Image (cartoon, helix red, strand yellow):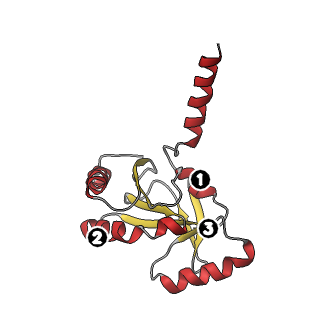
Amino acid sequence: MKLPLLAIVALHTAVIAAPVERLADFELTDQESKPRTYRFPKAKATVMTVADHKGSEQLAPWIQRIRDRYETRIDIDGVADVSSVPSFLRSIIRDTFRKKLTYSVMLDWEGSVVKRFGYTKGVANIYVIDRLGRIVTQVAGPLNDKALQSLTREIDRAITPTDTP
């Protein structure tokens, strides 16, 4: 009798840890303290990067390859998990982002948005989100050809105008 109960608990735990299938609308501020709102449906599919400090080191090659291939046909955005930063250091971290980056990155100080993705800490996480807010696929880790091929296949599907709200 213990085995089925353990199996049910394990299954329930796996479901809780998985990313949501469809994202709810959210709002965060970026390094310039400007509010960034994500509402679905959107006009374009999105590639969303999610990373903590260590994972952010792997993002640039991913973003460059995706941007080179898709240019303006998709939105590319990022959420930084800064939930481990003590509140008294937030302005310093915000300044660091401001000095290092020329593009907007949403800063998740509470960790509430990054938890929705079910992301893996310590590595780059790249998600394809269709126009309706559904997470189509996710890859994690440093750039590699096999993962990039899989990701671009799903981006190609997501930008095909067949989905309707």
Q: Residue at x 55, y 36 (%)?
A: 14
| Rendered location of residue 106, percent (x, y) | 54, 69
| Rendered location of residue 113, percent (x, y) | 59, 57
| Rendered location of residue 90, percent (x, y) | 68, 76
Q: Element under label 1?
A: helix
Q: In terms of depth relative to the viewer, which is nearer, 108 or 17?
A: 17
Disc 2 crowd rating (10 Å Cα; few below 14, some 14-19, many 20+) is: few
Answer with the quarter of the image where residue 124 lies: bottom left
Q: Element under label 3?
A: loop
Q: Mark 1 points at which residue?
A: 115
Q: Which residue is drawn at 73% across and 73% down?
A: 87
Q: Distance between the residues labelled 1 and 2?
A: 28 Å
Q: In terms of depth relative to the viewer, which is nearer, 4 or 21?
A: 4
Q: Name the residue under label 2.
A: 71
Along the polypeptide, which appears first: circle 1 or circle 3? 3
Tell me the tag on residue 56. none
